[in-house]
Image: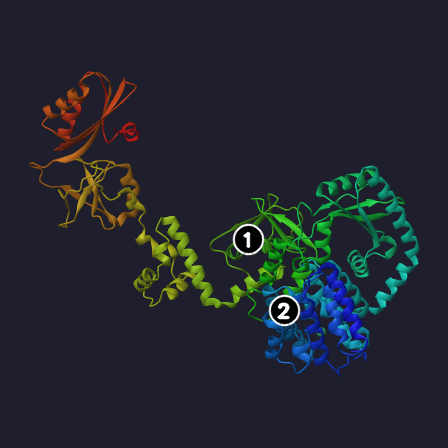
Amino acid sequence: MGEALPRFEEILDLVASYHPECDEDLLRHAYVYSAMAHRGQVRVSGEPYLVHPLEVARILAEMHLDEVAIAAGLLHDLLEDTFVTEDELEAQFGVQITSIVKALTKITTMEQSYAAREAAQAENVRRMLLASVEDVRVILVKLADRLHNMRTLRVLPEANRRRIARETLEIYAPIAHRLGIGRIKAELEDLAFAHSNPQEHAQLVEQLQQREAAARALIEEIREMLGRVLEENGIKAEIRGRIKHLYSIWAKLKRQGISLDRVYDFLAFRIVVATVQQCYGVLGLIHQLWHPVPGRIKDYIAMPKPNAYQSLHTSVMGPQGQPFEVQIRTFDMDQIAESGIAAHWMYKTGRAVEAEQERANWLRGLVDGQQENPRDFLDSLKLDLYPEEVYTFSPKGEVFAFPRGATAIDFAYRVHTEVGHRCVGVRINGRLVPLRTHLENGDIVEIMTSPTQVPSRDWLDIAATARAKNKIRAWFNRGEKEQAVELGQRLLERECRRLRIPVKRLRDASQLTKMAREHGFAKGDDFLAAVGMGRLGARDVLLPLSKRPDELHPPPSKASPAVVTESVVTVKGQRDLLTFRARCCNPLPGDDICGYITRGRGVAIHTTRCHNLRRLQAAGDRLVKVEWGPTEGGTYAVPLNVSFDDRPGMLAAITQAVTAQEANIRSCQMTTRDGRRGAADLIVDIRGREHLGQVFGALRQLAGVTSVASGPSAFSRRSQF
Ligand code: MN
């Protein structure tokens, strides 16, 4: 243990500095246990193996993590590389630490052929993300493990170095970025860059060295100016100037295809202040001092990145006309920017809980629906993990963040899987554009859908996010039959809505089976598939069930004496058919009439002049010829409405006039308004058209009556008493 113990004591001191009450016994126990188990093992470099878990623990302590994470770091290789068993580990350290170590052990890098290795790698990442959804410390320990391995990578053969470096760039650095752990991301990138691309790395280092002295002088000059202005304005701030990390400079050179001579903004400044208000104040002061570069001001305070990063960014033209970048943030924001999700596991911090939740959601989103080909998964992971984001809005103002390169299809699938599947077009900022259109910052995106739309294989090329690709693939993987079933269901539902048939009839299994049998199918799904494949027309299937024309004949209700069911009409050629007089036209003996066969409520009798009947003629085969039966002694309830100028005794005058015509009054309701105008709704037994004419005539002769009509008045319907 020779040189290891002092290292461990350093780590303990470091933990005690931010977490004075930490469980030192637990850490000592983990250290001693790890030292015993790894005894005699050496790394490729010839160092004792124990150095590795110790350095991993140190990285975790530098992230200010709790003792569980640090102990897990000390123990992380035990199950994989020593004879210690899960049971022993659990007996010594409990379930929590053991489950973190177990999860880490499942994430192993295998020495295999390239193709097999890639598949295994994807599977590893998936396991890691899954485990991290349960306990984010798994991924934090894994990142610390990877960081120390990268720091000591030079001892490995070149082929291995390149492979591990590439894996770091493609997977671990983006994960660190997405989790908001800026510090680890930058170091992983620089180390991976050095090993995966040694020539270009060396070249860039040399170029930067040539400019370093000048850059340092410039940083000092700018720092002084900034410090002076902030002091004059009474703002206490921490000002840091730095040369950006190598990989980000190199990535920018690559992206923009320019040489280092033109990349002046490899200088970056960070101003950390106490309050959000001061952040905006500082931004204003900087813009007074130097001209801002248009289009480079970004407000991640108002609109945090998905990894919870918050800051104001601006680029300005510096004292010698060279642009440089400034980030302005509060101390809290700075901690989140450096530590990201780890902030949640830091000792003494309740912050970032929401942000942690968001990241957990993001992890879940990556892992969900990943049953198929691990290679597809890795591809989509790489895409999703690429850092740059664009922010877009729904028409309702919801914000959706996407990786740069995402298209309208991605947006549709983000809103909802079904919106994605049915998406037919998109309006961006009010303009119709193709689905493959790339999303830009600030776009307002409105997706148009159609119930008959289905995903197209082209969409796999258009979609850029893992989520959309997974959903599209899942749709195709379900097979033609299922697609046809789904489409059939949709087509029928749409037709139901048109014909106003309750959609639940399609969703009820027994009703669906019944419908299927009527069309010669044993199962509901076969029937739906036939519709989906176009062998049966949705409209043809549903039209016979349509209730639409019947809506004109609501079932008679007791509260509505205007409709009386009576079988005094005979239907030609048929007997014993229930008939009733339609309330729209109230046919009476003497009127020319026509019957309409309703569903389940008998034959509705309309006058041939009725405008509703004309609409019903569209349903041709359900109209039947009818004629009046024997009328002796028969009467029909007819609603009458009488309007009048109100005067005392009006009700008596009306009832007298009606009964004088030998018509029985079944009911009568009076309504008056302002004490001047009134209306009476009566139900009167009438023998026929001629008799009705006599009653009408008698009422019209009454002094003060302004109108007589059959049917209730709208006036009285509003205010009955
Ligand atoms: Mn390790």
- Which of the image's four quarters has the C terminus? top left
Q: What crowding class fits label 2: few (fewer than 14 Cα within 10 Å), some (14-19), or many (20 or more)? A: many
Q: Nearer the viewer, residue 675 or 504?
A: 675
Pinpoint residue 701: horizontal percent, then vertical percent: 17, 18
Is the C-beta of the residue carrying label 2 under 8 Å from the nearest atom of ligand 1? no
Earlier residue among tags 2 and 1: 2
Q: Give above or below for 34 relative to 305.
A: below
Element on which disc 1 rests:
helix
Q: Nearer the viewer, mark 2 or mark 1?
A: 2
Q: Give above or below for 398 relative to 208.
A: above
- Residue depicted at x 60% and y 60%: 360
Type of amino acid under label 2 = Met
Confirm whether residue 369 shows in the render.
yes
**Circle 1 residue:** 415
Element on which disc 2 rests:
helix
| Ligand 1 quarter of the rendering | bottom right
Disc on res. 128: 2
Pinpoint residue 280: horizontal percent, then vertical percent: 74, 41
Based on the displayed image, in which of its 4 quarters is residue 510 positioned? bottom left
| Label 2 to label 1: alpha-carbon separation | 27 Å
Pinpoint residue 429: horizontal percent, then vertical percent: 62, 44
Based on the displayed image, in which of its 4 quarters is residue 564 positioned? top left
**Residue 121 as seen in the image, left or right of residue 611:** right
Type of amino acid under label 1 = Val
- Which of the image's four quarters has the N terminus? bottom right
**Residue 221 as seen in the image, left or right of residue 175:** right
